[in-house]
Image (spheres, rainbow, N blue to C red):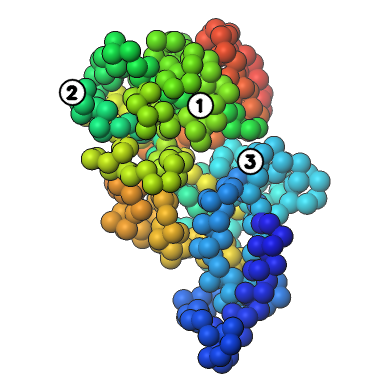
Amino acid sequence: MRFGARLALVVITLVATATACGAPHGSGSQSRKATDCGPYARYGKHAGTQVSVYGSNRDREADLFEETWADFARCTGIDVQYEGDGEFEARIQIRAEGGSAPDVAFFPQPGLLERFARAGKLKPASPALAALAKRGWSADWNSYATVDGTLYGTPLVANVKSFVWYSPTFFRDRGLSVPRTWSELMDVTEKVAASGVKPWCAGVESGEATGWPLTDWIEDVLLRQQGPGVYDQWVTHKIPFNDPRVVRAMDTVGSILKNDRYANGGYGPARSMASISYQEAGTPILSGDCAMHRQASFYAEQWPKGTRIGPDKDVFAFLLPGTDATSRPVLGGGVFAAAFSDRPEVRAFQEYLATADFARARMRKGPFVSANKGVDPAHAANPVDALSIRLLQDPRTQFRFDGSDQMPAAVGAGTFWKGAVDWIGGKGTQQVADSVERSWPSH
């Protein structure tokens, strides 16, 4: 949090504690409406305490988090200090090993969370937090933050990654239909290419995390070609990373993303995506310079201000199709809140984050997806978020968590990301797959 914002929060906390929770507030600067502290009474009073929070969310996403828990902070007296860092994956390890770990961290990779849990750095969930987790999420979701039978964190954010964003106007003007199978997807791709427009746009630059949009592509296609069983075996290394079925999925993705005829619309040759940030990667859809952009539900936050989302609006999304119209598993991801400290104010903050109340409050601020059972998709900020929540809550959905996020951090957030960038730059599929396989920890 910036110094000015941090100072403002301290001032607001002091004033609000005096006014919102019982003191007079009818004159001068205290004339604003008081905060209703009733919903936060269960978390107790922790005046003069501070909780440091560290995550990868920055800019507007960070602001929305801070706005969401502001009332909680005022009413409990906890000064919540959030720091967002685009180099989270690398720096959280440096900080934890150097003795300067935050009180709470927002982990986007279960594999990274597991690493710290096994090292004895993270604190097990309290009984109250575990009860909230069991009530709010499915066993599958809680398993991603469970290590050797012990729960260490709770889901904070969810997303659906198997979306293809497109312009409904572009499709309508060219007589294109939303594809229901992979064959139909390639037919649309070829028709757009034949019209002189590169059908796909992509960008994989993301600081220290550069490459993750490519690994998402590969995981999504493997899930569709081979099904959840083979996908699970690959993620857990029961089959090698360079299994022929994985190589086939990579080559399928390469037939699109390494093809200069199909990519990179609006930017240049296919390999240009290595230097295009993921945040700006889909914007050529709005100008008609590309037709499709495969990216997660959270990309809703990246469209330029004023962009309308919906089936008859500026942009919308469809699920990446599979081999047939009836079997389309869903790849997704999420962020998990886990603690390096075990103090009353830290536990109170964790418990608040684990409630449907927090998820609903965050949804009211803007685009946000949660897999919490208490969230109503009707209250989502846009139709894609609503679709995502319905998919996550549907017991028939074959949901699988992002593979690289579950792999050992050295692979999932290391050699796989880097290898994917080398691959898009021209290295052969087998060469890259073999290299990642050799990097897998032996134990």
- The mark that comes first in sequence, 2 or 1, is 2
Q: Amino acid at mark 1?
A: Gly
> Percent position (x, y) of residue 395?
29, 45
| SS at badge 1 | loop
Picture residue at 44% right of the left edge, 10% below the top:
260
Q: Amino acid at mark 3?
A: Gly
Mark carried by residue 175: 2
Q: Is residue 306 left or right of residue 311?
A: right
For label 1, the crowd category at 10 Å Cα-Cα, with few meaning under 14, some 14 to 19 and many 20 or more, is many
For label 2, the crowd category at 10 Å Cα-Cα, with few meaning under 14, some 14 to 19 and many 20 or more, is few
**Which residue carries the number 3 mark?**
86
Q: Does residue 423 lie above or below 320 as drawn? A: above
Picture residue at 43% right of the left edge, 40% below the top:
303
The quarter holding residue 291 reads top left
**Which residue carries the number 1 mark?**
203
Picture residue at 52% right of the left edge, 47% below the top:
335
How much space separates mark 2 and mark 3, taking CA atoms? 41 Å
Q: Amino acid at mark 2?
A: Gly
For label 3, the crowd category at 10 Å Cα-Cα, with few meaning under 14, some 14 to 19 and many 20 or more, is some
How much space separates mark 1 and mark 3, taking CA atoms? 16 Å
